[in-house]
Amino acid sequence: MSVTPINPKLSADLTKLEAEGFRLKLVQGSAYHLLIEGIPAVTSNREVVLGTLYTTLDIGPNGVTVNPVADHQCWWIGEAPCNADGEVMQEMISNKDPADKGDGIRTTIGFSRKRGDKASYPDYYEKIWTYVRLIWHEAQAIDPDCDPRSDKPVPAIVEASRRVFHYPDMATTRAGIGAAITKLLASRVAIIGLGGTGSYILDLMAKTPVAELHLFDGDVFAVHNAFRSPGAPAKEELKDPPKVDWFADIYDRMRTGIIRHPYYVGAEQLAELKDFDFVFVAIDNAKARKIILEGLIAFNISFIDVGIDISIDNRGFLRGQSRFTVGTPEHYSHIPEVVSFDVPAENDIYRNIQVADLNMLNAAMAVKKWKKLRGFYADDMREHHSLYTVATHGLTKEDKA
């Protein structure tokens, strides 16, 4: 398992909370979470019960909390805390709706309590104590002996699930979208072709929590590839390494699960695609495309095929289109109508021109559609074929499911 562990012993603020007897539960999954369990709170019936305070947890690459704390909000798991008279503490509540924080954590309400000077909390110790003190104070009015702390230090509970990244995805944690990110937890995704568009598909997919990304390409990374791929290789590095090695070496630095297949996919390799959750096809060989797409359809595998068409008009302007086509077991019939299997001309301008912007766009369109299929983004149109035209800045959407 590759993961940046939360280490409360290395974080002074968490260590202080732990030493004072607070019951800390640290969860690292699709995002990073801190729960403080056993907080006395008053119910609407003026009874003292125990609830749980929740906050997102900002962790640095070394597994230590990041301070000052950027997010002043907290959430609650349990009945909305009341004052000693049984009235809900409305002045603390910023959101009355339940929220799914991901990793099995569902909160009841949201709190907002800024420091008096409006500055950020210097650390999690002060942030947690601010909220606990307000809730606990009302409970003490009913039960003076209640206390959120044990009479001795309680070791923090750390729950860590398997993660593919070598360091924390703090954007997900800070945005509080752990539940949404879990929708992208596919097991095995293949990218066939690491040219201009395929390399950008890899760049985007490498930043999702897919467990395994399989790279298929039998070509080498040459000088011309440097101008249509992510990153900026040094001149000394351009020694024609296999593309799968070039790109895997880059993204291995960020995550696990990059699997190399240094060969092209043809009829003899089709059987290797049977067990993938999804396949991106980003090649310009029409014959190979036909073999691959027909194979994926026979295996009932969902895929996205991408393509770019560029021409030059009599005034010297480049005109072109960027396409993605989706195939799913529920909808394959449109493929022969919208995907060309004609062999391009030998002087096809796209083979010899650098249009990284269109490659990036094509990849972004494809990956965005994949995320829609996974339920991450809303997908009102549910199109299975889309075409962007450069000259008119037009976008067509066809073959709705």
Image: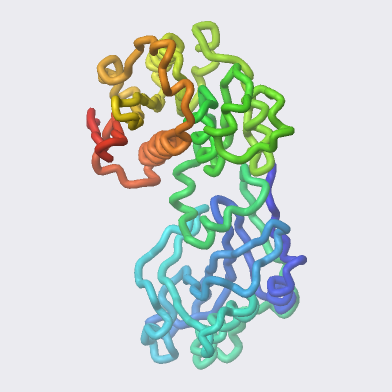
Quadrant where the N terminus is found in the figure: top right
Q: Is residue 321 above or below residue 164?
A: above
Quadrant where the C terminus is found in the figure: top left
Q: Quick check: 23 left or right of 364?
A: right
Percent position of residue 16, x then y: 72, 76
At horizontal 38% and vertical 26% (from top left) the residue drawn is 308
At horizontal 49% and vertical 58% (from top left) the residue drawn is 105
Q: Is residue 8 above or below residue 321?
A: below
Q: Quick check: 398 left or right of 38?
A: left
Percent position of residue 188, x then y: 53, 30
At horizontal 67% and vertical 66% (from top left) the residue drawn is 65
At horizontal 46% and vertical 83% (from top left) the residue drawn is 42
Q: Is residue 106 above or below residue 39?
A: above
Percent position of residue 250, x then y: 66, 37
* Picture colour scheme: rainbow
Quadrant of the rendered structure where residue 355 is? Answer: top left
